[in-house]
C-alpha cells in the first residue's frame, strides 16, 4: 500500500487504492474478497502530509456461537500524518508516520492494519439471535431442531435438587 511523494505533491482527492487482501491477512483476520478498498484524500500542511481516508473491509468471520463463517462489511475512517518532525510522533490525535525527504514513497499498510485490528468486535455473532450449537449433539440449532432435552427437569438433576 505505497503512496508516492509525487502523488502527495499533487494531492490525492478520494483516490481509490485496492489493497490485496492476502497482504492484510494475519492470525484470525480473513476476508471474503480479493481486495480491500481504500479511498484517500491528502492535504499539504506545514507539518507534513495529512491523509484522511476510508477503508471498506470485507471481513470473513467465524461465529462464536455456531462456528459458521459469515461475511460482514465494515467502513473504517482513518487519519494519518506523514511528517519528518520527530516531536509529533507521540501525538495522540492522529496516527503519525515518520516520512522524510529521503523517502520517495511510504507504505501505510502497517498503520491501516492497526485500524483493522481495533475495529473488529470482541464478540462475533452471525446474527444477534444466533441459537448456537446444541450442547449435547453439537448440531447447528439455526438449521434444525434436535431432539435432545437440555432441560433441567431431567431425572439426574432431581437428586441434586433434593440436596438443597
Ligand atoms: Zn452463529
Ligand atoms: Zn441436540
Image (tube, rainbow, N blue to C red):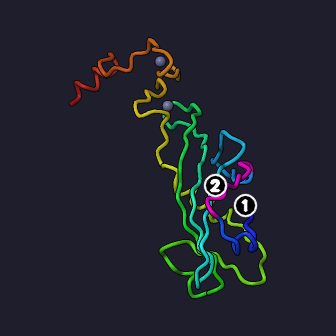
Disc sitting over residue 50 in the figure: none
Element type where label 2 sits in the image: strand
Residue 105 versus residue 120: which sits nearer the camera?
Answer: 105
**Count the marks: how many?**
2
Q: Position of residue 36 (x, y in %)?
A: 66, 49
Q: Position of residue 29 (x, y in %)?
A: 63, 48
Q: Are marks 1 and 2 in contact (CB under 8 Å)?
A: yes
Element type where label 1 sits in the image: loop
Residues drawn in magenta: 13-22
* Quadrant of res 12: bottom right
Residue 2 versus residue 62: which sits nearer the camera?
Answer: 2
Tell me the residue at 48%/37% (across/down). 125
Does 71 appear above or below 103?
A: above
Mark 2 Cα within 10 Å, few/some/many (few <14, many 20+)? many
- Quadrant containing the N terminus is bottom right
Q: Which residue is mark 1?
A: 1
Tell me the residue at 70%/75% (across/down). 9
Does 62 appear above or below 144?
A: below
Tell me the residue at 73%/69% (across/down). 7
Q: Which residue is mark 2?
A: 38
Tell me the residue at 65%/44% (across/down). 30
Using residue 72 as the reference point, say whether residue 113 is left or right of it. right
Residue, far top: 147
Q: Earlier in the sequence, mark 1 or mark 2?
A: 1
Q: Position of residue 34 (x, y in %)?
A: 72, 43
Amino acid at each position: 500500500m505505497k503512496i508516492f511523494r509525487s502523488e502527495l505533491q499533487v494531492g490525492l482527492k478520494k483516490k481509490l487504492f485496492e489493497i490485496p487482501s492476502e497482504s492484510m491477512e494475519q492470525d484470525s483476520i480473513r476476508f471474503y474478497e480479493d481486495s480491500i478498498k481504500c479511498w484517500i484524500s491528502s492535504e499539504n500542511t506545514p507539518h507534513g502530509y495529512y491523509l484522511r481516508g476510508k477503508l471498506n473491509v470485507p471481513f470473513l468471520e467465524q461465529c462464536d456461537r455456531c462456528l459458521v463463517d459469515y461475511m460482514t462489511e465494515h467502513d473504517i475512517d482513518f487519519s494519518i500524518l506523514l511528517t519528518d518532525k520527530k516531536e509529533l510522533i507521540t501525538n495522540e490525535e492522529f496516527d503519525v508516520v515518520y516520512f522524510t525527504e529521503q523517502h520517495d514513497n511510504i507504505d501505510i499498510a502497517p498503520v491501516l492494519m492497526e485500524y483493522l485490528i481495533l475495529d473488529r468486535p470482541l464478540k462475533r455473532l452471525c446474527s444477534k439471535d444466533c441459537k448456537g450449537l446444541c450442547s449435547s449433539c453439537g448440531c447447528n440449532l439455526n438449521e434444525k431442531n434436535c431432539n435432545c432435552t437440555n432441560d433441567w427437569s431431567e431425572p439426574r438433576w432431581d437428586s441434586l435438587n433434593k440436596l438443597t
